[in-house]
Image (cartoon, coloured by chain):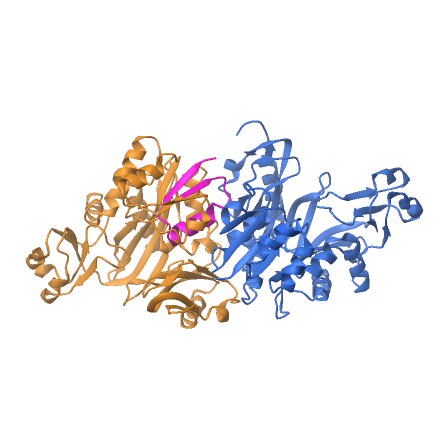
Chain colours: A blue, B orange
Amino acid sequence: MLKVGILGGGQLGRMLLQAAVPYEVETHVLENDPECPAAQLCTHFTLGDIRDFNDVYAFGRSLNSITIEIEQVNIDALEKLAAEGVVVIPEPRVLRLIKNKISQKAYYREHDIPTSDFVITQVRDELQHHLSFLPAVHKIGEGGYDGKGVQVIKDATDIHKGFDAPAVLEKLVAIKKELAVMIAINQKNETAVYPLVEMCFDPTLNLLDYQLCPAQVDASVATRATQIALQVVQGFRSPGLFAVEMFLNEEDQLLVNETAPRVHNSGHHSIEAMDSSQFDMLWRILLSLPLGSTRMRNPSVMINLVGSGDTGPAHYHGMTQVAATPGLSVHLYDKKISKPGRKMGHMTLLGSDMHQLQKQARELKNYVSVSGGTER
Amino acid sequence: MLKVGILGGGQLGRMLLQAAVPYEVETHVLENDPECPAAQLCTHFTLGDIRDFNDVYAFGRSLNSITIEIEQVNIDALEKLAAEGVVVIPEPRVLRLIKNKISQKAYYREHDIPTSDFVITQVRDELQHHLSFLPAVHKIGEGGYDGKGVQVIKDATDIHKGFDAPAVLEKLVAIKKELAVMIAINQKNETAVYPLVEMCFDPTLNLLDYQLCPAQVDASVATRATQIALQVVQGFRSPGLFAVEMFLNEEDQLLVNETAPRVHNSGHHSIEAMDSSQFDMLWRILLSLPLGSTRMRNPSVMINLVGSGDTGPAHYHGMTQVAATPGLSVHLYDKKISKPGRKMGHMTLLGSDMHQLQKQARELKNYVSVSGGTER
C-alpha cells in the first residue's frame, strides 16, 4: 500500500484525510501540535516542525509521496526527498516560486499573465520613492498567510505600515469581483478544471465571507478566467492541485492575484457540489489514478465560520437552529480554541437558484457564529 | 466533548467515522481485529470482543453514548451500561428483539405489520410437520448474517438443510421487487424518512447486486411502504436509525422481511445522493442535533464490490478504467483480504435518467471486480 505524507495538520489536512477513506493508502501527517485537526484521522501522526529541515526529511524518507496543506514548509528538505525518489506534489521548485510573493509576481510577468502592476521593495524606506504608484498593496515576500503580511498603502501617511523586508508593492485594483479557478494536473500533464467560483470577502478581517459557485459572471469572463488559470498552472510544469485567484476590475479585465499550490479554501464547496472534490482530486494525483470529474452537481454557496469575540475554548452558536436546513452541510474543524478571525469551520449550502442561495447564506451567517469563551 | 463508542469496526463503522469528521466528537471503536476497516479513523481504538460482556462493559463505561454497526454484540452489557446512564442507540431491548429472527417476526405479527406467514421451529425434525407449508425459507433465530443462517426449503428433500436450532420457517414469497426504507428517530421521537430504494440481489451469493434510488414503483406503493416502515419503527419506541426491508409480491402486497437497527448497506448511496447521509444522520441522533434533511440530491444506483475468485490479498481490477466516470464515487473498505462474497467496497453512480443509470451500473459491474490472490 502506498504511503503518502501531508505536511501540516490543519483543516485542509483534516478534510484531505477524510477524502482518503475510500482509497487504499497509508496516510502520514507531520505537525507540531498533537491536537491539530488532522492528528486523529491519519494512519501515522508525527510530531514535528514542518519548517525544520531534519523533521521534514526524517518524516518523508520512508514515504512514496508527499504533499502540503500549507506553503510554509521546509522546501530544502522536500528537494532532497525529491532527489532521493520521493514523489513531491507539487514539485518543490514550484513551491519555492509560489511561496515568495515576489517571485510569484515575477512569474506572472515573465509568462505574460495579466496581473496588477508592481514594484519590488527591499526595505520600508523605498516606499517613499513610489508615492506616485499609490494607492497600492504591500505584500511581504515570505511568511504572509490568511491576511497577515499584507498592508494597504493608500498614501504617504500609510508608509509606516509597510514591511521593512523584501516585499512587493502592487497597484491597488478597483475590484468588481474576486474569482478563483481550481485546476488539477496529473503526472501525465492531463488537466481537470473546476467551475469558476466567486468570493466575497469580509473587509475587516480580509477573510473569505462567502463564496458562490458558479460565479455570477458572463460566460466570456468565465472562459477567459479559465484560460488564464490554465496558462498560470501549465507554466509551472508540475503535477498538483492549484487555486488561481483573480480580480475582475471595473474595466472587466482579469488580473491574477495569487496562486495556491494546494487544496484551498475556495474549493471547500467541491466536497458536496462537485463529482470529485478538490480533496478527492489531490488523492487521485498522489495515487496515480485518473483525474476525477469536475462536473457540478449543484450550484452552491460556501460560508466560512470564523472565530469572533475573545480567544478561548470554542463555543458554537445557532448550530441547532440551522442543522436541519435542506442542502446544508456543516463542517467543523475540531479546533479547541477559537480566536478572532480563526477559521473554525465552514458551511456549504446547495440549491438551484443563485439569488435564493445568497439570501439564505446571509441568513445563515446571522444565525451561526463561533466565539471563544472560558467554558464549553 | 462527547465520547461516542461504536461496537464493531467494519466498513459501516469506517463510513460512520468518516461522517463524524465535521462534528465535535471523540470517537471510540471496539473490535477484535487491529487491522479492521475502522481502526485507523477513530480517536481511540480498543481491541476486544463485541460479543463479550466484560469487553463491551469496560469499553462503554466511560462513554456518553454507544451504538452498533452489527447486531452480534453483547446485549447484556449494553443493558447494564444503559442502566448506568450511558445512552445506547438503539435501546438494547430493541436490539434483542431484532437480533433474534423469531422475536422479530413475532413483533411484526403482534403489531399488525404485513409480513409473510411463518411458523416457529425448535429442532430440524419439526420441519417434517410443515410439509404443506413449503416452499418456505428457514432462518436461524440467532447468529445469521449476510446470507448465512438462511436456507430455502423447497420440499421434503431439502429438510436436511434446515437448522437444528430455534428458527423461523417463513412462507416463500413470490417476489416482484425488494425494497427498503431507511428511517431515523431521535430522542424527541421526531422522524426523518429517506426515499424508497429498490434492491436487486445476486441470486448465487444472496448479496446485494445493485440498488436504485428512488425505487421504480408507483407512488402508491412508495407511500404504503413508507407508512409500513414508520409503523415498524415507531413501534420500537427507541431512537435510532433503522432500515426496513420489504418484499413487493406478485399481488402488489408489501411484506416486511427484516429490519436492521443500524446503518445499513441499503443506505450507502445516501453519502452522495442525499442531503444528510445515513451516517451523518446517526451522528445527529447520537449528538442530540436536529435530524438532517433527507432531500434527494440526485437519483442514484449503488453497486457492491464483493470478492470473487480465491481468498487472499485483495486485487482490484478495472478501477483505473472507471475512476473518471462523471457522477461515480468509489468507496474501498481497506480490507486486506478478499474472500468470495466478502464486501470489499461499493460504487455509487449519480445521474438523472434511471434507465441510463441502470445501463451504466451493469457496465460498471462488468469493468470492476475484486479478487483474492497471492500478491498485491
Location of residue A372 in the rendering, given as x and y in whole percent from the top left corner: 60, 31
Q: Residue at x 22, y 63 (%)?
A: B174
Q: Position of residue A18 (x, y in %)?
A: 51, 51
Please tell me whether residue A329 belongs to the stretch shown in magenta.
Answer: no
The picture places residue B279, in percent across and down from the top left corner, at 42, 48
Which sits in the foreground, A149 or B271? Answer: A149
For the C terminus of chain B, the image quarter is bottom left
> Where is B266 relative to A157, above or below?
below
Q: Position of residue A114 (x, y in %)?
A: 79, 60
The answer to whether residue A332 of the structure is visible from this angle is yes
Q: Which residues are magenta?
A: B1-28
Q: Residue furthest left?
A: B129
Q: Nearer the viewer, residue A184 or A60?
A: A60
Is B8 in the magenta?
yes
Q: Residue placed at 44% from the left, 60% from the top?
A: B332
- What residue occupies the far top of the structure in this picture? A374
Residue B216 visible in the picture: no
Q: Is residue B47 above or below residue B133?
A: above
Q: Is residue A361 left or right of residue A176?
A: left
